[in-house]
Amino acid sequence: MSAIAAQRAVRGRFLDIQHTVCQAAEIAQAVRYIEDGLLITTAGKITWFGPWQEGQHLIHPELAVTHYPEQLIVPGFIDTHIHFPQTEIVGAYGEQLLEWLNTYTFPAELKFKDQAYADKIAEFFVQELLKNGTTTALVFCTVHATSVDALFEAAQQHNMRLIAGKVMMDRHAPDALCDTPESAYSDSKALIEKWHGKGRNLYAITPRFAPTSTAEQLSKAGQLKAEYPEVYVHTHLSENKNEIAWVKELFPAHDNYLDVYHHYGLTGQRSIFAHCVHLEEAEWDCLHATNSAIAFCPTSNLFLGSGLFPLKKTWQKQVKVGLGTDIGAGTSFSQLQTLNEAYKVQQLQGDKLSAFESLYHATLGGAKALDLDDKLGNFNLGKEADFIVLDLKATALQALRQQQVSGIEQALFALMTMGDDRNIHSTYIYGEPVYVKA
């Protein structure tokens, strides 16, 4: 490939957050908005970014410039918690967490023993991510190792950065969905060797949640983390009050729910705990001390009646947090819809979630939660060129509303309140367009 063929030049309105912050109030000072900007990528990395007037002389005469004069270009959305096998059960009626798992989730996941079925859903899932502007995701697969193969193979077709893992689950589930401590260890080890760091794929050790793993299996998960410290841990924590009570019955020797994971070496820099709606103070302190992260999943928490996540507390306790759609208890692949619900969750607690803080959580904050902020999340030089082109006026109502806004923050807030997949004009992965709205 020639140097010109490896390059892309994109012109338009750009918005990102320049660096990670310690408090929400600092985000406004970190916002970077360029009304007429230029992004140059080379072999998938950002090699120049800034105002068009300053960078146009750098463009080779043979390099075509893709211009989006009416749209808004932002870093790709990052989903820090989602289940690809639950794609087909979005909007399943009437249950809370534990009943929902038995009624809907486990029957759906049983189908993934069929490789052809897993391949079909994996491809559909990846396409849904791309059409919703999600360029990186942390994903639950099923107990079947082949489900991990199916997902990574589908993502690899688009050079997409995904983190995923085989569910570890040896009790309190249908026999056909249970592994053993030994098989979970050996299967996960083989998958780590096969996929972690291959291309843009990364692996996550994935016990479903403490109640579905015995102490022996959690010990094996901790052994894997000790043997492969660079891989991730992905599980659930304190989503539902009945779940928390169950954990206390199953693990009476531990101080709290998080202490179960911490005891087995499953907290840490690349450990992401989904939900965390009902944490005790000691759990907040442990998350901070271990540099663990939370995935905030508002549509799921509302749909299952789990509770209201205290986002403000993540700033107070200095705990990393990203945004999760949590398909299929979550009700949309769209991070815009997820932010719409996140705003309402905070309103119900007397707090406000600004448009810029929302963008932070969906992009750079999510990258920080996944320990990828050196690679993703904004338009800084050297980062991987994953970004999306947003149409702020995808519907007649949106167009009318955008006529009334003043400034980019109001425009962004209106988009996040009213937007969905229809607002994704294009999705770029590693500098290449992989989705363009028809």
Image: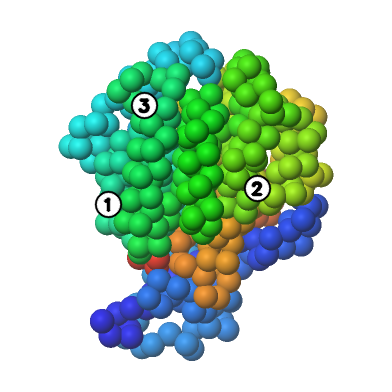
Of tags 1 and 3, the one toward the viewer is 3
Task: Report the residue that reaches farthest toward the left.
Answer: 116
- The residue singled out by tag 1 in the image is 153
Task: Label 1, secondary structure: give it.
Answer: helix
Q: Residue at x 55, y 75 (%)?
A: 381
- The quadrant of the image that shows the N terminus is bottom left
Under mark 1, the amino acid is: Glu
Residue 292, labelled with which disc? 2
Residue picked out by circle 3: 178
**Residue 422 x %, y %:** 42, 42
Residue 238, label in figure: none
Nearest to the observer: residue 428 or residue 66: 428
Q: Amino acid at mark 3?
A: Cys
How far apart are the alpha carbons under marks 1 and 3? 24 Å
Q: Which quarter of the picture shows residue 436?
A: bottom left
User: Which quadrant of the structure image shows residue 35?
Assistant: bottom right
In x, y percent, where is residue 302? 59, 23
Helix, strand or loop status at disc 3: loop
Marks 2,1: beta carbons within 8 A: no
Judge from the rendering whether residue 363 lies leftward or rightward of residue 164; answer left or right: right
Give the mark nearer the N terminus: 2 vs 1.
1
Q: CA distance from mark 3 to mark 2?
A: 27 Å
Label 3 environment density (alpha carbons within 10 Å; few <14, some 14–19, many ≥20): many
Among the two numbered marks 1 and 3 on one chain, the one whose residue lies closer to the N terminus: 1
Q: Residue at x 50, y 28 (%)?
A: 214
- Tell me where residue 392 appears, x and y as whole percent: 52, 48
